[in-house]
Image (cartoon, coloured by chain):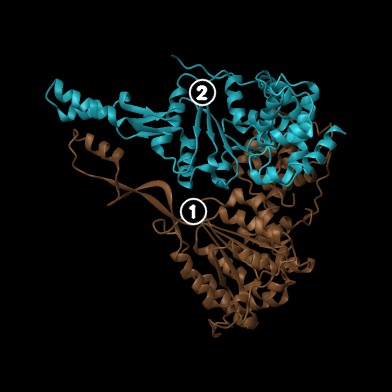
Chain colours: A cyan, B brown
Amino acid sequence: MSHAPLAIPPSVDALQEALGREQYIAERALAVSVYLALRLKRPLFLEGEAGVGKTEIAKVLAAALNTSLIRLQCYEGLDVGQAVYEWNYPRQLLEIRMIEIARDLDRAVAAHELFTETFLIKRPLLRAIEETRQRAPVLLIDEIDRADEEFEGYLLEFLSDFQVTIPELGTIRATEPPIVVITSNRTREVHDALKRRCVYSWIPYPDFEKEYRIVRAKVPGASERLARQVTAFVQDLRTADLYKAAGISETLDWAAALVALDRDVLDQHVIDETLGILLKNQEDIDAVRGERVGAMLARVLA
Amino acid sequence: MASRGSLGSDAKEPHEPESFEPNEPHEPRLISNFLLFGRVLRAAGVHVHRERMVDAIQATEWIGVRSRADVRATLSALLVHRHEDLPLFNEAFDLVFRAHGSSELKLPLFSLGERARIVMNRRAGAPQRLDVESESTESDAASAAFAIGAYSTVEVSRTKDFADFTAAELEAARRLMLRMHWHPGIRRTRRWQRATRGDIDMPRLLRTNLMRGGELIELPRRVRREAPRPIVMLADVSGSMDRYSRMLLAFASGLTRSARQVESFVFATRLTRVSRFVSAATGYRVVSRMVRDLHDWGGGTRIGEALRTFNTTWARRVMRHGPVVLIVSDGWDRGDPQLLVRELSRLGRRCSRLIWLNPLLGSAGYEPLTRGMQAALEHIDDFMPAHNLRSLEDLATHLQRLGRPHHGDHRHT
C-alpha cells in the first residue's frame, strides 16, 4: 500500500470539533496543545492524576484522524524485547529441526534464513515505525512513569530519530514521525530531557460543567437530574482529603451503576451501598461513609 | 489541599479578557515580547529551552495572537514542562502580557511564596538576590570562615551530643557528614543483566547460538539487576528539635550526595518537600532559612498531620520501589496520637523499613513516654538515636545491612 499522509485539521477549532465528534470534550488549552503537537510533529506529553482521561485522548485522536492506534503500556523492567522487537526463538528452533530433516543443514544458509521477518516478533515501537509506511499512526506510550530510567533513555533516542536497528536485519526508519502521545500519572518525576522534547499539557480534574457533559454523553441512560447530582457529588467528594480521589472513569461507572439500579435520585442509603465504585481505598470509604456522605448529599441537594 | 500540585484546581485556566493585542505574527514587537517573557520565566526559575522558544514563535503563525487564552495555552504547552511551574508561568504571563501592557517590569514581582523565594536564592548568577540570604549572620559567617580554612583544625568528637557542639564544631561536623558514604540496602529490580552465574538467559542463548546453526556453544546467564533502595527522610524541624535540625539537614545533604534516590521533607506543623535543595551547593542555606521561618511560625509539631499530608500528597510520587523511610523526630507531638498511629501504620505498610531516629534516645535515662512516641513504637521497625556522629555511623552500618533481597525481606520490593 502506498503512503497516505494524515489530514491534520487546519485549525484549533477544527480539531476541537473533530474530537467532539468522537465524544471527547476537550478544553481549549488542551486542544491547542494537541494541535501544536500535530503541527510541530512533537510528542504530546500529558500529565495529570489517574482517571482524568489522558489515555482516552490518544484513542480519540486516532479515531478523529482516521488512523490506527498503537499502544505501549509501560512497567518496571520494560525492555527492548517487549517494547521494540524480539526474535521468535521457539519457531526458529522448530525451523532448524525441519531444515535438518528435509536436507543436510547448511549452517550459513540456515542462519540467514532464520533471521528474517518471519521470525521477528514486532512490538509496539517497531510496529509504529513500520505503520508509517502507510499512514502515521498514533503511538500511545502509556504511564511512562512506571517504566524505569533505562527505558526512558532508550525512548529519548527513539523519539529523536524514529528508527530501529536490528543487527541481523538492518535499520528500519519511519517514513514520517508517528503521532506520539506519552502519559504520566506522576508516580515519579520523568526526566526533564524527555519532557523538554514534548509539547506539555497538564490535565486537571474536569470542572462541573465539563464533567456533567461527559456523564451525559457517556451514560445516556442517566436522567438529567441524576447526572447533575452524580457530578455534583463527585466534585464535592474530590475536595475531601482522601488518599485517592475519584477520576472521571469512576464517575461514569457510578452513574452507570445507579442507572442499573433504577435510581433517579441520590439518597444516603444508595451512596453508602455503592461508595466502593467511587473510592477504591478502604480507609477512604470508612472516612466518608455515613456522616460525611450525608453532609455532601445535603450540599448536592441544596 | 495545603501543598501545591496534587489536585487539578490550581491549574485551572485563569479568566481571560476578550481582547488581546492584535499583532501580526512575526512582528518584531511580538518576538521581542516573547523573548522578554522567556527571560522573565528563566529569572523565576522555570527552565526554558531555547528551541522551545523558536517553536513558540513559529506556533503563533498557526494559532494566531488574537486570543489571549490561546497564546497562553500555546506558550504554556511549549515552554513549561513541569506541573509545579504552572502557577509561576501564569503569574509571569499576566505580568508580561497585560492587555496593551507597557514593558516596564519591576522584578522580582512574584508573590512572596516559599517557592519563589527559594527559586531566586538557588540562582547562582544573581548576587543581589542572594543578599536576602545574607541576613543570616551567624551561619554565613561560619561558612565564610570555613572557606578560608579557619575550621580545618577543629577536632570533632564522635560521641559528643550535637546539642553541646559549638558553632565551630557544628560546621566541622557538617563538612564531615557531607563526605560520609552511605550505602542504603539494595533491592532487586525487574531488569535483567548478564552475569556469569544465575539463570540461563534463554533469549540470548538461542540468539547467539542460532547464528552458529543451533549448537549450544555458549551458556549465557542472567540475574535481576540490583539497585540501591531509595530513601525517604522526614525530618522534624520544630522548636524542640532546634539544636539538632542543623546537623540533620547536613545529614540529609550527605545522604543525598552519596545515595542515588533520596527524598527529603521537613515538617513542624506542616510538611514541605526539600529534596531539590538539600542536594544543591547553596541549598543547605536555603533550607536552614526555611527552617528558621518555620520556627517563627511556632506552634510545635503535629507529626500525625505531617504524615497524613505525606501519605495523601506525596507517597504515591516518592514511595516507589520499597524505600527505607527515616523519620527524625524527638516525638514531642502536639497533635492527635490516634491520627499519628493511623498514618504511621499506613506509611509502614508501604515501605521496606521504617526507622525512627530520635536524638533524645542518646541521653541517659530517656524513656519514650510522650503519647505520640509510645503509640508510634509498635509500628516502626527500628528506633535509633541520632544525637552524635557515632550514632549516625551506626545508622550507616545498619542501613548497609538492610534489605538484601535474600535474607528476610518480608515486604514488597
Front position among marks 1 and 2: 1
Mark 2 surroundings: few (<14), some (14-19) or many (≥20) residues within 10 A: many
Inter-mark Cα distance, 1 to 2: 45 Å
* Chain to which the residue tagged by mark 2 belongs: A
**Chain of the residue under the numbered disc 1 shown in the image:** B
Q: Quadrant of residue A57?
A: top right
Inspect this view and state whether residue B86 appears: yes
Q: Which mark is residue A118?
A: none
The amino acid type, in three-letter code, at marker 1 is: Arg
Q: Nearer the viewer, residue B201 or B279?
A: B201
Of B331 and B81, nearer the camera is B331
Q: Which residue extends farthest left? A: A104
Q: Pointer 2: what residue? A: A136
Left or right of residue A56: residue A121: left
Q: Is residue B395 above or below residue B84?
A: below
What residue is drawn where x is 53% and y is 40%? A144
Say which element carries label 2: loop
Residue identified by numbered label 1: B411
Kindly give the residue lying farthest to the right in the view shown.
Answer: A302
